[in-house]
Amino acid sequence: MSAMDAAHGLSGRTLFTAIFGDPVVHSLSPAMHNAAYAALAIERAYAAFQVTPERLREAIRAIPAMGILGVNLTVPHKERALRMMAYLSDEALLLRAVNCVINRNGELHGDNTDARGIEADLRENQVTIEGAVAIVIGAGGAASAAVLAMLRLGAMRIVICNRTVARANRLARGFARYLGARGGGHPRQTIETRGLDALVNATTMGAAALVINATPMGLKTGGFAPLSYAAAPATCVFYDMIYAREATPFLAPAIALGRRAIDGAGMLLHQGELAFELFNGVAPPAGVMRVALMSALGRG
Ligand code: NAP
């Protein structure tokens, strides 16, 4: 049954989940979640709501009032929503961002599945970073998720490169506390911060095993910041959190050089599968959300 068929099956008993974003019209989450509802044959549906930042508080307050089971938050709401939850998971607190709001008997619990999403995607793609150097471009919520995933995957040195270095420093300080409190684990792990000029530094790029774009560069802006792809080792993997039908502006030069390039579709899929289970208390049937996403991306 297609997502459209599932929507036609709405009744007085249908329970809802949703995504709030601004913009939200291009979101692929409804296609993924509704495909899983159709496969499970349960009376649930996933809707997309265009919610402006000014009205986010009102929209979040409406979740228990309307009996919505759970809501994904996307740009620009993830950080602002932190203060609107009754409870926060340790991961949402650490990342200072919420991408899943779960309605538990009228109380709103904020969680974040982005780090687990990128981690699962890197594992699935057999990208190993244990003991190696990872460059994370950006210092917002997505970059924060990338840094946590890098720490969990055992990267030895993480270099955060951001346009605003002060913001990268804030992000690094948050993780320094986490690394200190965690003890054990990978005691030699370090986090450094740089400006975007580090992306054309042969020494920095020459040490990288993985370069992750966690900014909207290339999506909102036409091109990407200057980056020395050729200075990176031949085995370096380029990962863009942005996903598109065509190669993204960050990945296109890497592909042209024959480097391994992965876009954010897999991350979107894995964070979505985790969100589905949090909202519905049941895992999506294997492969269903993937097929819906790939078909929406024209990769069917
Ligand atoms: P955000 O908080 O808005 O991130 C902004 C970051 O991007 C900041 O570090 C900012 O630098 C930088 N930036 C923005 N515009 C820039 C420009 N023109 N030039 C240079 N740097 C720029 O957003 P986010 O929530 O972290 O998300 C970042 C990206 O990841 C988005 O494109 C989002 O769609 C994607 N994402 C994908 C997934 C997935 O599942 N695939 C999940 C989460 C996010 P300053 O600090 O200097 O402003």
Image (cartoon, rainbow, N blue to C red):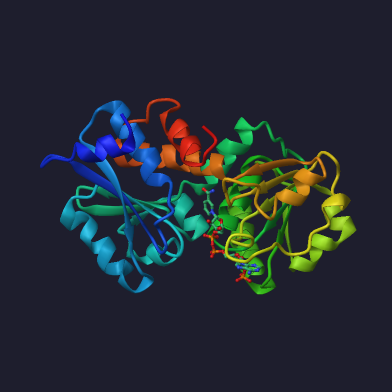
Name which residue lies at 20% across and 55% down. Answer: 64
Counting from the top left corner in percent of width and height, residue 97 is at 46, 59
Q: Is residue 6 above or below residue 249?
A: above
Who is closer to the viewer here, 287 or 222? 222
**Figure quadrant of residue 172:** bottom right
Q: Is residue 200 above or below residue 276?
A: below
| Extreme residue in the left direction | 12
- 213 relative to 114 in the view: left or right: right
**Figure quadrant of residue 257:** top right
Who is closer to the viewer here, 79 or 86? 79
Name which residue lies at 69% across and 54% down. Answer: 250
- 135 relative to 67 in the view: left or right: right
Counting from the top left corner in percent of width and height, residue 31 is at 38, 41
- 141 relative to 108 in the view: left or right: right
Q: Is residue 165 above or below residue 67?
A: below
How many numbered marks, from 0 up? 0
Counting from the top left corner in percent of width and height, residue 200 is at 83, 62
Name which residue lies at 79% across and 43% down. Answer: 236
Which quadrant is the N terminus positioned in?
top left
Name which residue lies at 16% across and 57% down. Answer: 65
Regarding ligand 1, which quadrant of the image does it lie in?
Answer: bottom right
Residue 184 visible? The answer is: no
Residue 114 visible? The answer is: yes
Q: Is residue 23 above or below residue 257?
A: below
Counting from the top left corner in percent of width and height, residue 291 is at 46, 31
